[in-house]
Image (cartoon, rainbow, N blue to C red):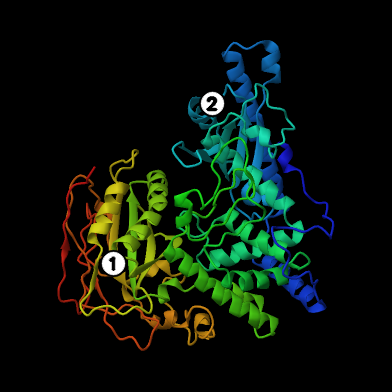
Amino acid sequence: MGSSDQEFSTPPPASRQFGITKPISTAGPTETDLKRTIELEEFLVDAGLHESSEEATKREEVLGEIDKIVKSWVKQLTRQRGYSDQMVEEANAVIFTFGSYRLGVHGPGADIDTLCVGPSYVNREEDFFIILHDILAEKEEVSELQPVPDAHVPVMKFKFHGISIDLLYASISRLVVPQDLDISHGSVLYDVDEATVRSLNGCRVADQILRLVPNIENFRTALRCLKFWAKRRGVYSNVTGFLGGVNWALLVARVCQLYPNAVPSMLVSRFFRVYTQWRWPNPVMLCAIEEDELGFPVWDPRKNPRDRTHHMPIITPAYPCMNSSYNVSTSTLRVMMEQFQIGNKICEDIELNKAGWGALFEAYLFFETYKNYLQVDIVAVDAEDLRLWKGWVESRLRQLTLKIERDTYGMLQCHPYPNEYEDPSKQCSHCAFFMGLQRKQGVKIQEGQQFDIRGTVDEFRHEVNMYMFWKPGMELYVSHVRRKQIPSYVFPEGYKRPRPSRPICQQLDKTSGEDIGEECEGGSSERRLKRKGEADCSGARPNKPEKRASISPTHEKLPTTDQQDHEEVIFNDSVDVRANSLKDSMAVKGTEDCVEASCGKRQR
């Protein structure tokens, strides 16, 4: 294993300043803060966020086996290319970890982000994605092997003894890779391409984060807590346009710098206090942006026009410094700011002994928040095809959000929800994603104005259909559903539960920050109501399309947060786009004008 896996356990000098500004407060914890920290740590243990010692040992063994495989692979290639026996003997590859595993905040079942660093004569395109891929494919302990060579950061995904691995590769400009390679040193970036820089950056960033926080254990506890909170509140997903693991780590690390002597309970509370008041797009940075003679582009909105368009810049601390949150859109930033407000209010209640930690981690009631949703159904013939097809479609869902924002000039807001759902009644492999829809809050619109997004969805469909590994049976359906039509399989108990008498988000002080309290008022007690004729894949015949009717209800008001604004917002919802093999009446009682979606053959 590489030298970056050493522990940064030595506490830094108390007098050292962390970050680019002075701390907000150097106050230490009170007895009450220490008590709350113990309660928080007990809550995290009870929530099952820590892996067992057996699983930890298994992970170390798996990493050891992968390390042996890549070393053998490099020696094999060295011999085949005619190098001397001494070169074959010295040939080496080193495995590093990064992400949550490297930071020490991974939980049970989490994947391990790994990087293989090899010599200059072993390349990514053929040696890694073909030769090493074939070696792994022959191993019984390897399953679900999926190469993704065209990703922004090329990766090979697989499971090894049931543990998920994301394996990157970096070929550095050395004939022999030393076992004690210091990956944080700038020399590893000499004479490499940008894809290699991105592959190396994950490890370099993780190591820098651990160097730039005042207390690693306090950082880890706070980060573990806030990652759990983000998942419970539906804002943990880089691919959907929210924030992923490294983004949350950087945000928490900055709060640790601003409150260097705070314990985890204080850090969690200060996290929400800081980021409810943060003036985006001012960047979050752990250190000054470093320029280097190597000439790789770094984040700089003064020089790079594209960097000026970023909504929520969170800058990585290792050269070349990049914005790790470029996926965030106006809509997802709005959602996160609302959740920060809610978290801040709950933490204030916890400090006043009006609430316990459990209140902070209540699940977000996404399906009780909006009146209108887009439902994206993804189907395939079998589980393996669905895994590949879903990965592609999910990576494009963010584009659908951006296109809707673009085509409605920001008047129709999207809230993509990162959770996926499966309909167990379907005989084919299936999953579904949902997006909440609402008009822009506080903006009056003209009577009769409609949001017709059929062309937007068609454009999205066309792009998704360009998937180079498409197979018959891989289908995509996008339809507009009202809240009362949400399928029952999305609810944990299998049915819709009554709306709470007073949702947490209504408890916010409506004079502070954004008025997000009334966004939840659309929720209501609903009886179990399943859409009629729910699509059944049992008779799927991809090459013989049939028609499917989409819901086209009469005019309906979208949720509004302004009680004084009674302008009616019309939603034109004939957006069902891929009805190959699905036949579905889906008419709703009271609907007067049911418009059928035109169903043609798959467009290439």
- Relative to the observer, which residue lies in front, 187 or 171? 187
Q: Residue at x 68, y 66 (%)?
A: 44
Name which residue type carries label 2: Asn
For label 2, count other residues whose C-alpha is less than 10 Å away and answer few (under 14), some (14-19) or many (20+).
some
Q: Residue at x 71, y 60 (%)?
A: 219
Inspect this view and state whether residue 495 appears. Answer: no
* Residue that carries the numbered disc 2 in the rendered image: 123
Is 506 placed above or below 131 here? below
Specify the farthest residue to the front. 302
- Relative to the observer, which residue lies in front, 499 or 331? 331
- Relative to the observer, which residue lies in front, 375 or 398? 398
Is 416 placed above or below 325 here? below
Given contact means CB atoms under 8 Å apart, are the residues at marks 2 and 1 in contact? Answer: no
Name which residue type carries label 1: His
Q: Quadrant of residue 466?
A: top left
The quadrant of the image that shows the C terminus is top left
Q: Secondary structure at mark 1?
A: strand
Q: Position of residue 35 (x, y in %)?
A: 78, 75
Q: Position of residue 304 (x, y in %)?
A: 48, 48
Q: Is residue 52 left or right of residue 439?
A: right
Q: Is residue 531 left or right of residue 549?
A: right
Judged by depth in the image, the label closer to the viewer, 2 or 1, is 2
Q: Position of residue 504 (x, y in %)?
A: 53, 81
Is 67 placed above or below 561 here? above
Q: Quadrant of residue 497?
A: bottom left
For label 1, count other residues whose C-alpha is less than 10 Å away and answer few (under 14), some (14-19) or many (20+).
many
The quadrant of the image that shows the N terminus is top right
The alpha-carbon separation of the residues under discs 2 and 1 comes to 46 Å
Q: How many marks?
A: 2
* Residue that carries the numbered disc 1 in the rendered image: 480
Is 467 placed above or below 43 here? above
Q: Position of residue 210 (x, y in %)?
A: 72, 51
